[in-house]
Image: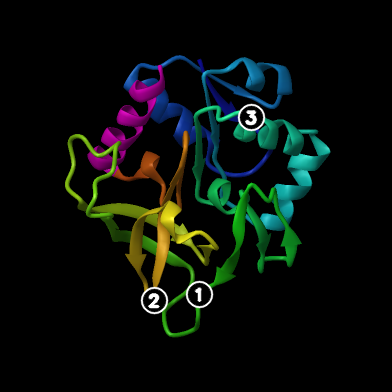
Amino acid sequence: MIAVVDYGIGNIGSVANTINKLGFKFRITGDPEIIGKSKIIILPGVGSAAAGMANLKKLNLAETITDQLRNRKPFLGICLGMQLLFDYSEEGKVECLGFIKGKVLKFKKMKKVPHIGWNRVSFKSNGFKYSQGFKANSYFYFVNSYYCEPADKSIVAGTTDYGESFASVIIRNNLLATQFHPEKSGITGLYLLNNFFKHYL
């Protein structure tokens, strides 16, 4: 069973609809016990890092999520759900979950912010294990004003250019995190999600 973490932020409905379309069992939940018993955890999110962290702490989910990540539970972070995995976000100047060393920075003014729409993701040349069915330089749908800068560049599995190159995909052990929204990225996003789910279910 897939647990979609409900912490009062963003795109839960579209994520749930996509999982349902793919035919996988899931629950939308804010219950730490159910999250702990799931096979895969999804942390979605659209909104501010400060609000996201406040909600996770208020619902006693911050510790649950970090514990599951440390135990290498298969985990998908989407958009804000990716950013909250880092140490710190410039958005609201807030400390985040701290599972990934690094910070979340705002795009410079050379481009229109937020970054909204389709953009190319260049996956690492040594392969991307969830890429069956789509090309290495495919387009995905973004909505972000901030981007992640991990201290360990080896975990960056894909990059995107928006005035500057930034990490749009991160893989570490059983963690997959995307700055784009796979659930809004058409057939390519469906392939990515289906590949990730099938890998662990």
Tell me if label 1 and label 2 are in contact, CB under 8 Å: yes
**Which residue lies under the disc numbered 2?**
164
Question: Real-space Cα distance between discs 1 and 2?
Answer: 8 Å
**In the image shown, does 96 or 6 lie closer to the viewer?**
96
Q: Is residue 13 magenta?
A: no
Marks 3, 2: nearer the viewer: 3
Sequence-wise, the earlier of marks 3 and 2 is 3
Q: Which residue is mark 3?
A: 68
**Residue matched to label 1:** 107
Contact between marks 3 and 2 (CB within 8 A): the answer is no
Percent coordinates x, y for residue 24 in the rendering: 40, 17
Please, what is the three-letter code of the amino acid marked with disc 1?
Phe
10 Å crowding of disc 3: few (<14), some (14-19), many (20+): some
Q: Nearer the viewer, mark 1 or mark 2?
A: 2
Most distant residue in the bottom direction: 110
Q: Which stretch appears magenta?
A: 186-201
Q: Amino acid at mark 3?
A: Gln
Look at the image and say whether residue 190 sits in the magenta stretch. yes
